Amino acid sequence: MQCSWKSVVLLALASVAIQYTAIRTLTSTSYLLCPAHSNSGCDDERLSNSTRRTQVLLLTTTRCGSTFIGQLLNQHPDVFYLFEPLYHVQASIIPRIHLPSDRQVMLGASRDLLWSLFQCDLYALESYIRPAPTNHMLDNLFRHSASRTLCQPPVCQAFKPGDSWEEWQCKKKCHPLNLTLAAKACHGKPHVAMKTVRVPVVGDLRPLLEDPRLNIKVIQLVRDPRGILSSRIETFRDLYRLWGIWQATGRRPHTLETRQFTTICDDFYNSVSTALSRPAWLKGRYMLVRYEDLSRNPLQKTKEIYDFVGLTMTPSVEEWIRVNTRATNDAQAKDKFGTMRDSAANAESWRQKLPFDMVEYSQGACQRALGQLGYREVQSAQELRNMNISLVLRKTFVPFL
Ligand SMILES: *[C@@H]1O[C@H](CO)[C@@H](O)[C@H](O)[C@H]1NC(C)=O
Ligand SMILES: *[C@@H]1O[C@H](CO)[C@@H](O)[C@H](O)[C@H]1NC(C)=O
Ligand SMILES: *[C@@H]1O[C@H](CO)[C@@H](O)[C@H](O)[C@H]1NC(C)=O
């Protein structure tokens, strides 16, 4: 009884003001003591089902190759995958994150939503979607077609079981999304995986990792920040306009907002430092992956990732990796946010693109993170462009078991 009472209060709060939800959830202990909005309430059966389930959170930032690694999880038949559900939290609370304090406000709401989604309580998304969905039918879940399960029966009847999954096909045919069916499909899978670029550091996840009702494994994906910068300049032209000018003209604009870059380095450094200090709450739950290592050896790295999260490799996943790590430049150009690319060459292409003084600046701003993650600094333009010299030092990050 206590449970449904709480759900009612939560629903009321959510409809009064999402902002309130955000502020309320700044406290580290979640007030979501049972799955909100759930039909079946909080019975023990449900809780015991969710403790058996493994939840995988792919923690990263934009332009790190997370689409690819997310797909590695999505490809597996035992995984229910969601692509960046926290997009909706940010869109409804703070369209553009500017201040560090904004990130803190988002964090509370983000953690609560992750908590619910990890238990397959997908209705929790509805509080963050405008206009509010009716009958749990959603027409605008961000990138819903990136999730295989959401594109297959019983969730989407446009395809037959066993049909191959293509994101663009699903986008055309599988809407609106019936969240009730999606939640059922989620309950049917032993793994729930989500990707997010909207949680800055692993320490922010501590309340979720300590929750005995969840069994979360975090994969933190990092990349050489110089490569991230180069890739963002290409992809987010407006947001990184001044950096683009610097790249094109060789002159640094006076009004350049360097925090766009330094945040990457600070977040990496802080998050990885936390993990390397091996706190008890991360034991068995954290794995660090460098994008460059994944690119060079996708099959081997995928096996390690699967081992860590408790999945076994399947022939179809192996095949998918083969197809998707060797593509022509043509496919790459058409597929900005996609996974088709010659992964190894792509990971280091920034070395031919960024001017040396920009690289020098970024090395200065990012020294600690580069050192910690095993990315070597270059001292000259010749060294930068000479691909015979590797800037990715051999470094083994053993999962903290
Ligand atoms: C829990 O698992 C049992 C047995 O697998 C299943 O019958 C039941 O529907 C599950 N409950 C929920 C709420 O998913
Ligand atoms: C969504 O799926 C559920 C479960 O099958 C069904 O009961 C419901 O009618 C569907 N909703 C709509 C609007 O079709
Ligand atoms: C890189 O190595 C190849 C093969 O050893 C060599 O032919 C080439 O000249 C080297 N390039 C540079 C820039 O040193």
Image (cartoon, rainbow, N blue to C red):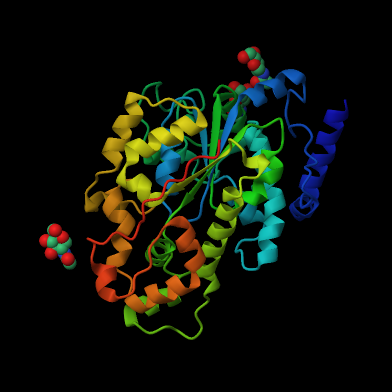
Which quadrant: the C terminus?
top right
| Residue 286 location, quadrant | top right
Is any atom of residue 31 visible in this view? yes
- Which residue occupies 35% across, 56% down? 392
Q: Is residue 400 left or right of residue 77?
A: right
Q: Quadrant of residue 278?
A: top right
Residue appearing at x 57%, y 49% in the figure: 276
Question: Does residue 132 show up?
Answer: no
306 to 263, vertically: above or below: above
Looking at the image, residue 218 lies above or below residue 108 = above
Residue 380 placement (x, y as % from top left): 30, 75
Instruction: Assign the N terminus to one quadrant of the image.
Output: top right
Front-most of 329 and 91? 329
Q: Where in the figure is residue 242, as x and y percent of width and height?
A: 44, 77
* Image position of 118 with respect to 384: above or below: above
Q: What residue is drawn where x is 48% and y is 30%?
A: 149
